[in-house]
Image: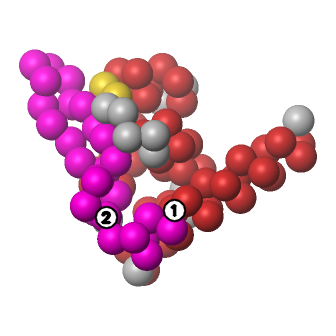
Amino acid sequence: MQEILTAICDPTRRAALSILWDGTEHCVCELMARLDATQSRMSRHMKVLREAGLVLDRRDAQWVRYRRNPELSPEFTAVVDAVLAAEDASQRKVA
């Protein structure tokens, strides 16, 4: 549990998870563009999410594609769902 909480404490990683959480696969280049992050920074963040078991990756030529881990336990999925919902609600209040 600690590894998951540590992984989702960073705003960039939460934003990346928010993009990936619908189950679709996204290239690291897309994540970079949408989150205004450099390749090295995005790769470091995605490594943390991958090592926590939240996302899976696959190489596609020179790029890496990421997607939500479909085998994540329901308990951990519920934690991520709650954090992303709270983040979304918080952003709506600011806007």
Look at the image and tell me whether residue 56 can be seen: yes
Q: Position of residue 24 (x, y in %)?
A: 36, 33
Residue at position x 10%, y 19% from top? 61
Is 68 inside the magenta-drawn segment? Answer: yes
Relative placement, left or right, of 79 versus 23 is right
Q: Position of residue 8 (x, y in %)?
A: 50, 61
Q: Are marks 2 and 1 in contact (CB under 8 Å)?
A: yes
In the foreground, 55 or 29: 55
In the foreground, 65 or 47: 65
Q: Amino acid at mark 2?
A: Leu
Relative placement, left or right, of 52 versus 2 is left
In the foreground, 49 or 73: 73
In the foreground, 52 or 38: 52
Which quadrant of the view contains residue 62? top left
Instruction: Name the quarter where the C terminus is drawn.
Output: top right
Residue under numbered circle 1: 80
Q: Measured along the vertical axis of the image, is residue 3 above or below residue 11?
A: below
Which type of secondary structure does the marked residue at label 2 adopt? loop
Q: Position of residue 64 (x, y in %)?
A: 21, 31
Mark 2–mark 1 distance (CA, rounded to whole Å): 10 Å
Residue at position x 28%, y 54% from top? 70
Residue under numbered circle 2: 72
Extent of the magenta region: 53-78
Q: Amino acid at mark 1?
A: Val
Residue at position x 83%, y 42% from top? 92
